[in-house]
Image (spheres, rainbow, N blue to C red):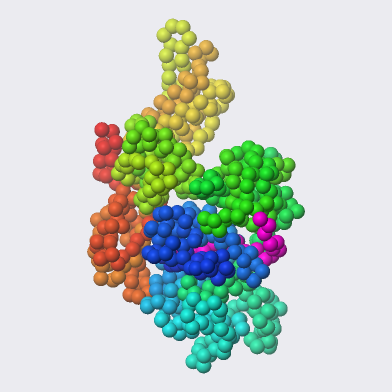
C-alpha cells in the first residue's frame, strides 16, 4: 500500500511520557481520534474495548501501559510517529529505549496532582537524551484539577523555564477552552467531544492575565535571537510579529531547556492544540542533525546525516511478538532507505540479515509498506538475530551506533513448569520474553537446577508470568521473590594460588601470586597483568584471569557474585613439562577463593529509592513503617491538595508486598514508587542470617 510522501522537515517522532495514571494513553487516544485514525475514543479502564495503543490483555485489564506502542498519524500535512510509553517505574527501560530514538516528547501531568514521582524520573531521562519537550497538564477539568498549581509544581520540581503558551478558560468543571497567547484569541468548545474549536475574543475578565502571560512569553522568546532582542528592547512587544515569535519560541524549545505549557482534557477537542504545538515547536529529524557512530572495521568515528541519499543506518529499539506475523523489530532509520527484501548488516553481531516485510503500525493494526526512509519509524518482520540496541547498516558502509544500556534487574523468582508438557513451552516462552525485554533475565541455578527469572520489580515479574500463561499457555509454579545480593571485598590482600599434582607421569603445575583489592563501585571485575620476564608464560595468563573471574561470579561467602574487584597477577612459577592452561586456571581459582576470604568480604544488597505520596493523616504511620523496614527517610515535601511526599531509601529485601501493606495502612489513598538506587553493605547481623540460610 503506497503512503503519501511527506518531506523530512514535516516529520515528527514524538513520545508521550508521564507518571502512571496522568492520562498519557487517553491523550494519545484523543490524538488518534482527532487525526482520523479511530472512529471513537478508547476507554483506558472499565468499559469499552480498551485503548488503541494498549493492546496486550494485561494492559486492558490493569489500565496501564506496559509496552511502548508506535502509531503513525497525520496532522496539517505533517506525519507524526507517536510512541505511548509506560508510566510505571518497573517499565522504566521501555521509556529509556523510546527516548533514545525520539526527537521530541509531550510530558503529560495529572492536573489534580501536579508533578509526581515518576514525572521526575521520565523528565530526568528526557534530559539525559536531550529530548525537547512540551508540557500538557491533563484533567484540569476535573474536581481538584488546577492548571496554575500544577504549573507551580513544574517550576518547583522540574524547571523554572516552563511558560504557558495557552491558558485555560474557566475552572474545573467550567473549563471550556484556552486563550492562545501567540495570536491572543480564545478557542472554545461547548462539549469536549466537539469536532472543532470555535475561535473568538478573549473573555474580558481574562484579558489582563493573558497580556501579562504573553509579555513573559515574548520576553523569554526573544533571548533566542540577538536581532530580535534588540528589536524588542527598542520598539517593544508590539513590534514582534507572530511569525517572529513562533520562530524564536521554536529555537528555544529545540535547545531542550525551555518548555511550553498547555492544559485541558486529554479526551477532548483541545488535543488539537497539542497537535499544533507538536508540529510548530517540536523537532523534525532535520533539526536533530547528524548522528555519530563507529566504523566497526576501523574503529573510526563516522557520521550519518538525516538524508535518504546517505548510506542506510538504523537502530532497533524494541522487539514485540505479534500473534499474526511473529517477531516485530521496531526500528528508527537515521539515514538512507531500508527496503523490504534487502540485505542489511547487523554491525552489533557482525551478521548479515534479510529484511522480510516492513509494516507501519497502528497499535495492533498494521499496513505493509515497501520501505522506511531516513527519520522514520516502523516495524520490520524477518530479522532473526537482531535484538534491542543493535545497529542495522548498509553492508558496504558499516556503522555501529551507540547502543542502549539497561540496569541489572534486582528481583528474582524461581519458576518451574507444572508438567512435562509445560517444560518445552516454558523454555520457548522465556526465550521469547527475554528477547523482547532487555531488563528481564533468565538463568539456571547450578546448585538447585531451578530456573530463575530476574526483573525490575514485583509487578514486572507478575506481568511476565501472566504473559507466559496467556500467550504461551504455560502453567508454572512460582517461588517467593528473592533479592539479588552481591559480595565484595573491603581490603587489599596478596595471596598465592598453587595447583600441583606431580606423582609420577605427566603432572599438573600452576603457581600464581595475585593481588586482590576493592574496585570503585559499579566498575565490576578488572584484571591486570604485571608479570615481569617470563615467570608465568604469556599463554597461561588468560586462563589465570578466567579462573579468577569464574570463581568470583560463583560467589565465595554465600554463593552470590563477587563484584567490584581488581585482580593483579604479579608473580608465579611454572614447570616446563607439567604446566598447562588448566593448571593455571585452577591456580587462579584457588587464589581468588582464598583471597576473598582474607580480604574482609561483605554482602551487598540492592537499596531502593522509595517515594510515597500520602494524605497528611497517614504520614506518621507510613514513616514508622518505613523505619521498621530498615529505611532512611531522606526528605519530605508538600504536594498539591494537602498531600505529602516522603522520599527515602529502603533495602529491597524489606519491600516485598509493600504496595498492599501501604494500601491497608492508608485506606487505599497512598501510592508509592521505587527504583534501584545503589548496592550497599548489609549490616553484619542481617548478613549472618543470609549466609547461614544460603549455606544450609
Q: Nearer the viewer, residue 530 or 552?
A: 552
Q: Nearer the viewer, residue 139 or 230?
A: 139
Query: How many discs appear?
Result: 0
Residue sitting at x 69%, y 44%: 342
Q: Quadrant of residue 482?
A: top left
Q: Is residue 546 above or below residue 16?
A: above
Indicate left or right for 174 with 2 as reference.
Answer: left
Residue 349 appears in view: yes
Residue 472 covered by magenta stretch: no
Q: Quadrant of residue 670?
A: bottom left
Q: Quadrant of residue 641?
A: bottom left
What percent of the width, then of the height, locates residue 401? 63, 48
What percent of the width, then of the height, locates residue 11? 65, 63
Q: Magenta part of the protein: which range?
A: 1-19
Residue sitting at x 34%, y 40%: 476
Q: Quadrant of the N terminus?
A: bottom right
Amino acid at each position: 500500500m503506497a503512503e503519501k510522501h511527506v518531506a523530512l522537515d514535516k516529520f515528527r517522532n514524538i513520545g508521550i511520557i508521564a507518571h502512571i495514571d496522568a492520562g498519557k494513553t487517553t491523550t494519545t487516544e484523543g490524538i488518534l481520534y482527532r487525526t482520523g485514525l479511530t472512529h471513537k475514543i478508547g476507554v483506558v479502564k472499565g468499559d469499552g474495548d480498551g485503548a488503541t495503543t494498549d493492546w496486550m490483555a494485561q494492559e486492558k485489564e490493569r489500565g496501564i501501559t506496559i509496552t511502548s506502542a508506535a502509531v503513525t498519524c497525520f496532522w496539517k500535512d505533517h506525519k507524526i510517529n507517536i510512541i505511548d510509553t509506560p508510566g510505571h517505574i518497573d517499565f522504566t527501560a521501555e521509556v529509556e529505549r523510546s527516548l533514545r530514538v525520539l526527537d521530541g516528547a509531550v510530558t503529560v501531568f495529572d492536573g489534580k496532582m501536579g508533578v509526581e514521582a515518576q514525572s521526575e524520573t521520565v523528565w530526568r531521562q528526557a534530559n539525559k537524551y536531550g529530548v525537547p519537550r512540551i508540557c500538557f497538564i491533563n484533567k484540569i477539568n476535573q474536581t481538584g484539577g488546577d492548571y496554575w498549581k500544577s504549573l507551580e509544581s513544574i517550576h518547583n520540581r522540574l524547571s523554572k523555564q516552563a511558560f504557558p503558551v495557552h491558558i485555560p478558560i474557566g475552572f474545573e468543571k467550567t473549563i471550556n477552552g484556552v486563550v492562545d497567547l501567540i495570536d491572543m484569541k480564545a478557542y472554545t468548545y461547548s462539549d469536549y467531544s466537539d469536532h472543532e474549536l470555535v475561535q473568538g475574543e478573549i473573555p474580558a475578565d481574562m484579558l489582563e492575565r493573558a497580556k501579562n502571560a504573553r509579555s513573559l512569553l515574548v520576553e523569554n522568546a526573544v533571548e533566542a535571537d540577538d536581532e530580535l532582542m534588540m528589536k524588542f528592547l527598542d520598539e517593544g512587544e508590539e513590534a514582534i510579529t507572530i511569525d517572529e515569535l513562533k520562530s524564536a519560541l521554536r529555537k528555544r524549545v529545540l535547545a531542550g531547556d525551555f518548555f511550553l505549557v498547555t492544559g485541558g482534557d486529554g479526551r477532548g477537542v483541545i488535543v488539537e492544540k497539542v497537535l499544533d504545538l507538536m508540529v510548530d515547536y517540536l523537532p523534525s529529524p532535520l533539526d536533530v542533525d547528524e548522528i555519530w557512530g563507529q566504523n566497526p572495521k576501523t574503529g573510526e568515528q563516522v557520521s550519518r546525516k538525516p538524508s535518504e541519499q546517505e548510506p542506510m543506518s538504523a537502530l532497533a529499539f524494541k522487539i514485540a511478538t505479534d500473534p499474526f506475523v511473529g517477531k516485530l523489530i521496531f526500528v528508527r532509520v537515521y539515514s538512507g532507505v531500508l527496503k523490504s527484501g534487502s540485505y542489511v548488516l547487523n554491525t552489533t553481531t557482525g551478521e548479515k540479515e534479510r529484511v522480510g516485510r516492513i509494516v507501519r503500525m497502528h497499535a495492533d493494526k498494521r499496513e505493509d509498506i515497501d520501505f522506511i526512509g531516513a527519520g522514520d519509524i516502523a516495524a520490520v518482520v524477518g530479522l532473526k538475530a537482531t535484538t534491542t540496541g543493535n545497529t542495522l547498516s548498509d553492508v558496504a558502509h558499516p556503522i555501529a551506533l551507540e547502543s542502549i544500556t539497561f540496569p541489572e534487574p534486582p528481583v528474582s523468582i524461581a519458576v518451574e513448569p507444572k508438567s512435562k508438557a509445560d517444560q518445552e513451552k516454558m523454555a520457548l516462552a522465556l526465550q521469547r520474553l527475554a528477547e523482547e525485554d532487555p531488563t528481564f533475565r533468565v538463568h539456571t541455578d547450578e546448585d538447585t537446577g531451578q530456573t530463575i527469572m530476574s526483573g525490575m520489580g514485583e509487578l514486572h515479574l507478575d506481568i511476565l508470568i501472566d504473559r507466559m500463561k496467556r500467550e504461551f499457555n504455560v502453567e508454572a509454579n512460582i517461588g517467593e521473590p528473592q533479592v539479588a545480593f552481591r559480595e565484595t571485598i573491603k581490603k587489599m590482600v596478596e595471596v598465592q594460588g598453587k595447583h600441583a599434582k606431580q606423582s609420577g607421569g605427566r603432572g599438573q603445575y600452576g603457581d600464581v601470586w595475585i593481588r586482590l583489592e576493592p574496585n570503585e563501585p559499579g566498575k565490576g571485575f578488572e584484571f591486570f597483568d604485571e608479570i615481569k620476564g617470563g615467570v608465568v608464560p604469556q599463554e597461561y595468563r588468560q586462563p589465570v584471569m578466567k579462573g579468577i573471574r569464574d570463581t568470583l561470579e560463583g560467589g565465595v561467602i554465600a554463593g552470590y557474585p563477587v563484584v567490584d574487584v581488581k585482580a593483579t597477577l604479579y608473580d608465579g612459577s611454572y614447570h616446563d613439562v607439567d604446566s598447562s592452561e588448566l593448571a593455571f586456571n585452577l591456580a587462579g581459582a584457588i587464589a581468588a577463593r582464598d583471597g576473598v576470604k582474607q580480604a574482609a568480604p561483605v554482602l551487598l544488597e540492592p537499596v531502593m529509592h522509595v517515594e510515597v505520596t500520602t494524605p497528611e493523616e497517614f504520614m506518621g504511620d507510613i514513616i514508622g513503617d518505613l523505619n521498621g523496614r530498615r529505611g532512611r527517610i531522606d526528605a519530605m515535601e508538600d504536594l498539591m491538595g494537602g498531600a505529602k511526599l516522603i522520599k527515602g531509601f529502603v533495602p529491597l529485601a524489606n519491600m516485598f508486598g509493600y504496595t498492599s501493606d501501604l494500601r491497608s495502612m492508608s485506606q487505599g489513598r497512598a501510592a508509592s514508587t521505587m527504583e534501584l538506587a545503589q548496592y550497599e553493605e548489609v549490616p553484619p547481623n542481617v548478613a549472618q542470617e543470609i549466609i547461614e540460610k544460603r549455606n544450609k
